[in-house]
Amino acid sequence: SGLLSEHKPSYWGMASIVIDIPSLFQSAGVSEQTDGLSLALRGKDSQGAQGALIFGDETLFQRSPVVQSIVLPNGSWQIAAIPISGWGSDLTPIWLLRTSGWLLALLIGALIAALVETRATNLELALQDPLTGLPNRRLLEDRMQQLLEHHKRNKTGFGVLTIDLDGFKAVNDLYGHRTGDKLLQIAAFRMQSSIRATDTVCRSGGDEFIILVDDVHSRSDLEKAQHQVINKLTGNALVEHRTIQLQASSGIAFYPEDGETLDSLLKASDRKMYSNKRGGQVFDIESANQRN
């Protein structure tokens, strides 16, 4: 099922954020006409006065507006404001400047909130398997390292349970990846519902899963957890009007008896799993609707 490398800080990717500017301004309560003011914003791509219009009427910048710059990390924007009724009204430039400053603060606050929320969402997605919603390999590696350090300090034990869905390739070959994906989702749900809140089930790739079983005092305790997961996981699964018999092979490793590093524990659980594998076809179609 593949091994995870030792936990080392390293570059592993990048994330990008796309923001719908009109929706952002709308959520901040800022529009082309706000509180008696006509507003316009320019400086696309942080190019300030030379940048393209972001929102509002571009001619506003030629009508003697109050203009305020918004300093950004790689440039600036410019926001312009004039009274809707014109400069002949009772509004003064000082009052107008204060109001535009308030609107500017509101705008920047909304932008920061959107960036923080989007960053949190991207971070969650980077640590999550998009198909099953389970932690992915990277998050598993982090949690396993935390468990290893904790149990080393406290001289206690934890377990690693490796699971491989038997005959899964046959399902993809016979019925397509859509059916295979739904079967993986069912398997993930069953495993997640069979463990404690302190345990972690991860999809490590393909049809392979790893479960970290925290705070087990003996190999016997780990074997009980293994049997509970397998009993919950295996059995008939209804997928797109077909009944598929879901079976799996598994192996366990107990810290510290089977290893004291991430790799040694994963190797030990892999060896157990492959030795427990049984040959033959294990995905059987039992319903009348066997073909599309």
Image (spheres, helix red, strand yellow):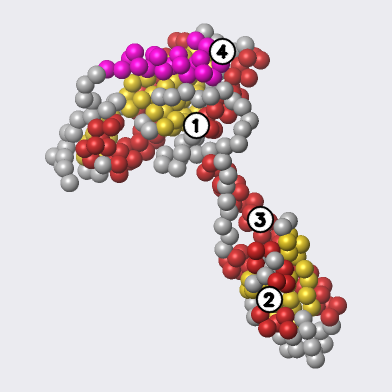
CA gap, disc 3 and disc 1:
29 Å
Label 1 sits on residue? 137
Label 2 sits on residue? 40
What is the secondary structure assignment of the residue under circle 4? loop
The quadrant the N terminus occupies is top left
**Lower sequence index among marks 4 and 3:** 3
Instruction: Please give the name of the residue rendered at 69% of the width and 63% of the height, measured from the top-left corner.
Output: 46
How crowded pointer 2 is (Cα within 10 Å; few <14, some 14-19, many 20+) is rated as many
> Which amino acid, by three-letter code, is at mark 3?
Ala
**Lower sequence index among marks 2 and 3:** 2
Q: Is residue 7 positioned above or below 61 on the image?
A: above
Query: Which of the numbered marks, if any, corresponds to residue 151?
Result: none
Q: Main secondary structure of the magenta part?
A: helix
Instruction: Please give the name of the residue rendered at 30% of the width and 38% of the height, measured from the top-left corner.
Output: 180
Label 3 sits on residue? 113
Answer yes or no: do the residues labelled 2 and 3 have beta carbons within 8 Å? no
What is the secondary structure assignment of the residue under circle 1? helix
Label 4 sits on residue? 260
Name, please, the residue furthest toward the bottom. 88
**Lower sequence index among marks 4 and 1:** 1
What is the secondary structure assignment of the residue under circle 2? strand
Answer yes or no: do the residues labelled 4 and 3 have beta carbons within 8 Å? no
Answer yes or no: do the residues labelled 4 and 2 have beta carbons within 8 Å? no
| Mark whose residue sits in front, 4 or 3 | 4
- Magenta residues (range): 258-278
CA gap, disc 4 and disc 3:
43 Å
What is the secondary structure assignment of the residue under circle 3? helix
Q: Is residue 106 visible?
A: no
Q: Is residue 230 visible?
A: yes
